[in-house]
Image (spheres, rainbow, N blue to C red):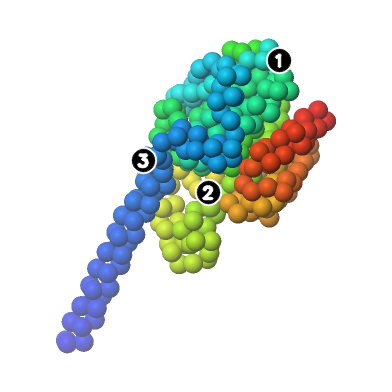
Amino acid sequence: MKKNRLKKGIIITLTTIIILAAGGSFAMGGYVADKILHQNADKDTHDNSIKQLGEWEYDINTFNKTYTGTEIAATAEDGNTVPATYFDSNSDTCVILVHGAGGDRVSTYPLAEGYLKRGYDVIAIDQRGCGANADDRVTFGIKESLDVKAMVEYARQTLGKKTVYVHGQSMGAQTTAIYASNVTPGTINAADAVICDSPVPGMELILKEMFGDGDTESFMAKYLTGTSKFYMGLINKIDYEDGDTINVVKNDNIPTLIICSDKDSVCLPNQVEMVYNNVACEKKAIVHFDSAHIEGIIDYPEEYMDSVEDFLNN
């Protein structure tokens, strides 16, 4: 009798512990998922862009005096409004620029200048969770790719552009790669080519690196990523696998140029090369610059644009 009571007590205790642990993990997953999705909630992403340009010693005032942009907007298939600035060079070729994490469209203006000097039209968009974009959630390119798709169609149908390219930087390059992997070449919303500068290699991978301070195999990295992944998939209907750039580009059949920054400590060169190796399209290329993260356009502006044009022209 005593043994049965003891056994029953142990079972109840263990069950209670498991329930509490599961509930705690679910709550932790929800907390972390919310922080991931709303990572820019307390940030001024426009001001962050201005500060970044200042650190690069880029003269944004001269850019604004030289080039006049027009505010435009497109509507994504999920109803989200995509705000952007359109710089018209009277070209039939347009380049859509997609910025990285924590900033807004202004951070791509050094890149915009490179294209404008060479006669291209440019559209610089705000990603979700950034700038004036209506959606305040950052999804590492998963939902943001819908905005790119809408803007490509806008450039063709509304602006009448014959040729459309998409050029992304960092998380914007991840968005660009995911976008290219989810459109059919030759359709109205498919770009003629894409350029991915230092693409984030994957949503789950970058989160593990962040949570584990670089150690993706640590308990904390696996626990926080695992619980948030489960919660986000169940509640927010966002699957981390859809943001796995390295794997997703196996479906990328759009001509793709990958730009690798050899001094990159954010998106490591070997990870960027893995993205390149997996791109399905045979018309692909990779170029390297002896620069820090996405700073090739800053350090070597002419060589950078020469590499881009060589790829596009060929």
- Name the residue tied to disc 1: 92
Mark earlier in primary sequence (3, 1): 3
- Residue 224, image x, y percentages: 42, 58
- Which SS class for mark 2? helix
- Residue 71, image x, y percentages: 51, 17
Mark 2, mark 1: which one is toward the viewer? 1
Mark earlier in primary sequence (2, 3): 3
- Which SS class for mark 3? loop
Amino acid type indicated by mark 3: Asp
- Name the residue tied to disc 3: 42
Q: Is residue 126 above or below residue 153?
A: below
Horizontally, residue 152 falls left or right of residue 282, namely left
Which residue is farthest bottom?
2
Q: Residues within 10 Å of mark 2 (few under 14, many from 20)?
A: many
- Name the residue tied to disc 2: 203
Amino acid type indicated by mark 1: Asp
Image quarter in which the C terminus is found: top right
Q: For the point 49% across and 25% down, which residue is it?
A: 82
- Residue 18, image x, y percentages: 30, 67
Amino acid type indicated by mark 2: Met
